[in-house]
Image (cartoon, grey):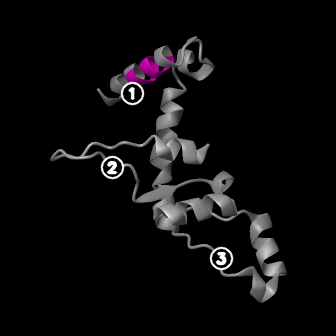
Amino acid sequence: MLAAVLEQIAMPRPGGGRPRTRPDHLVADKGYSSRAIRAYLRRRGIGATIPECADQAAGRTRRGSRGGRPPAFDPEIYKRRNVVERCFNHLKHWRGIATRYDKTAQSYHTAVTLTALLMWL
């Protein structure tokens, strides 16, 4: 689903023009540490800060020199992911969003937008 989400990105430019469709960098947790996801991000030219799973690291070391180098990981960039996680935590304090009572995607999107606006205010 990561590719589907990244395909929907459209960030408007401040001075006008075509919207940006590719982020500069992606910070994700170990669930996104697969070889296919890393290859997809490399093909699109998106930098990634994703910690490596223990089983992947063990498999790489077991293969020895054929295992390749470990993927780049910057712990200082990864610390910034906490801001997004706290935002999700605040959103989940709203019962309607946490349990998803809304029937349609549009009404759920509206509820999340309204909640985000109230948090921002």
Q: Quadrant of residue 92?
A: top right
Whether residue 31 is in magenta: the answer is no
Distance between the alpha carbons at the discs numbered 2 and 3: 30 Å
Distance between the alpha carbons at the discs numbered 1 and 2: 23 Å
| Residue bearing the label numbered 1 | 116
Callout 2 secondary element: loop
Mark nearest the camera among 1 and 2 is: 2
Circles 2 and 3 in contact, beta carbons < 8 Å: no
The boundaries of the magenta stretch are 108-113
Give how far across and how far down residue 20 sits, in percent: 33, 49
Nearer the N terminus, badge 1 or badge 2?
A: 2
- Residue found at the very far left of the displayed protein: 15
| Residue bearing the label numbered 3 | 70
Q: Nearer the viewer, residue 107 or 88?
A: 107
Give how far across and how far down residue 34 sits, in percent: 69, 59
Dot 3 amino acid type: Pro
| Residue bearing the label numbered 2 | 20
Nearer the N terminus, badge 1 or badge 3?
A: 3
Which residue is rendered at x = 77% and y = 85% of the image?
A: 66
Give how far across and how far down residue 23 sits, in percent: 40, 54
Q: Nearer the viewer, residue 100 or 65?
A: 65
Question: Is 93 drawn above or below residue 57 in the view shown?
Answer: above
